């Protein structure tokens, strides 16, 4: 992908991150996953508001399979982030920069924990599980294993809502950068290659 500079120079938006902006792979993972998260939360909000009818069912029917895909994607994204770390756009100094780093780490922590607990419960239930037809667990006789199912039953939903609150704060900060401080933080994830 390319972008034309005001002086006519063509600048490539590279696959890898650079200190000026996030590259194509990081952006694809960020925005693609944001879309799938929106689907997951919208489905659960509709289920809680409307009950288990056909509208919520349309979204929630893919919840466990897409949640599993999100876990795979966050592992890839974390590895890609570590590989690109030395060349990523730097955070500003001071408490705001440290808060941004802490916020991103908390997002990663919950993006890992929320589906991991649910998959541990799916395994421990003893039932077969085949997201999008891919046989992941074949199931076993003897019923659920309590220590595997209990953590998700206690905390999967709760932690998912905490993640949604954190995402709302994250979006608010991205908008504050754009509308209040008028700096280029949003552009380095969303804007053109300049
Ligand atoms: C990062 C991915 C995921 C997100 C953001 C997410 C989010 C949520 C949310 C918001 C709820 C509703 C909780 C409530 O109404 O109190 C929920 C429930 C549920 N999720 Fe997920 N989920 C994810 C992954 C998974 C996976 C991978 C599975 C199964 C393999 C799963 C299975 C369930 C089940 C069975 C429920 C209903 C029971 C409960 O609330 O624990 N989820 N999820
Ligand atoms: C409208 C929605 C969103 C907007 C406008 C937005 C905006 C941004 C921006 C501007 C950055 C770069 C920040 C910087 O360089 O300091 C960023 C990075 C990041 N965002 Fe978002 N974001 C959105 C949705 C999400 C969602 C849904 C998640 C997670 C569930 C998320 C997780 C992250 C993480 C972990 C980073 C750090 C870079 C990385 O490792 O990908 N964002 N976001």
Image: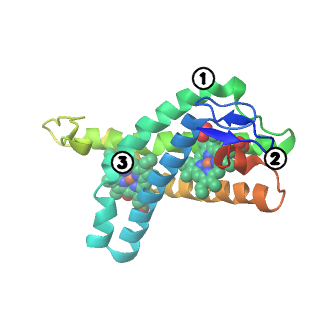
- Indicate the position of residue 167 as horizontal and vertical percent values: 60, 55
Could you say which disc has been placed on residue 29 in the image?
none
Q: Quadrant of the N terminus?
A: top right
Mark 3 is surrounded, within 10 Å at the Cα level, by few (under 14), some (14 to 19) or many (20 or more) other residues, namely some
Is the residue indicated by label 2 positioned so its CB lies within 8 Å of ligand 2? no
Residue to which mark 2 is pinned: 96
Q: Is residue 45 left or right of residue 4?
A: left
The percent coordinates of residue 188 (x first, y second) are 70, 43
| Viewer-nearest of discs 2 and 3 | 3
| Residue 169 visible in the snapshot | yes
Crowd tier of the residue under label 1, counting other residues whose Cα lies within 10 Å: few below 14, some 14–19, many 20 or above: few
Counting other residues with Cα less than 10 Å from the Cα at mark 2, is it few (<14), some (14-19), or many (20 or more)? Answer: few
What residue is disc 1 on?
A: 83
Q: Is residue 26 above or below residue 171?
A: above
Snapshot colouring: rainbow
Q: Residue at horizontal 68%, vertical 49%?
A: 191
Q: Is mark 3 within 8 Å of ligand 1?
A: yes
What is the distance, in whole Å, between disc 2 and disc 3 at their CAs? 33 Å
Question: In this rendering, which labeled residue sits more in front, label 1 or label 2?
Answer: 1
Relative to 38, is 21 on the left or the right? right
Front-most of 36 and 6? Answer: 6
Disc 3 target residue: 66
**What kind of element bears circle 1?**
helix
Instruction: Determine whether 10 is above or below 64 in the image.
Output: above
Tell me the CA gap for discs 1 and 2: 24 Å
Residue at image coords 36%, 69%: 47
């Amino acid at each position: 992908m390319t972008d034309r500079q005001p002086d006519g120079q063509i600048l490539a938006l590279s696959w890898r991150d650079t200190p000026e902006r996030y590259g194509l792979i990081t952006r694809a993972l960020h925005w693609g996953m944001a879309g799938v998260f929106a689907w997951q939360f919208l489905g659960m909000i509709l289920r809680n508001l409307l009950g288990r009818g056909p509208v919520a069912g349309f979204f929630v029917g893919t919840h466990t399979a897409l949640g599993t895909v999100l876990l795979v994607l966050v592992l890839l994204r974390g590895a890609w982030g570590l590989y690109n770390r030395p060349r990523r756009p730097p955070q500003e100094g001071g408490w705001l920069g440290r808060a941004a780093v802490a916020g991103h780490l908390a997002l990663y922590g919950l993006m890992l924990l929320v589906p991991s607990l649910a998959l541990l419960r799916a395994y421990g239930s003893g039932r077969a599980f085949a997201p999008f037809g891919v046989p992941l667990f074949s199931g076993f006789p003897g019923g659920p294993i309590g220590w595997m199912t209990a953590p998700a039953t206690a905390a999967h939903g709760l932690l998912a809502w905490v993640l949604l609150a954190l995402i709302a704060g994250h979006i608010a900060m991205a908008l504050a950068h754009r509308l209040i401080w008028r700096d280029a933080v949003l552009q380095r994830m969303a804007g053109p290659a300049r």
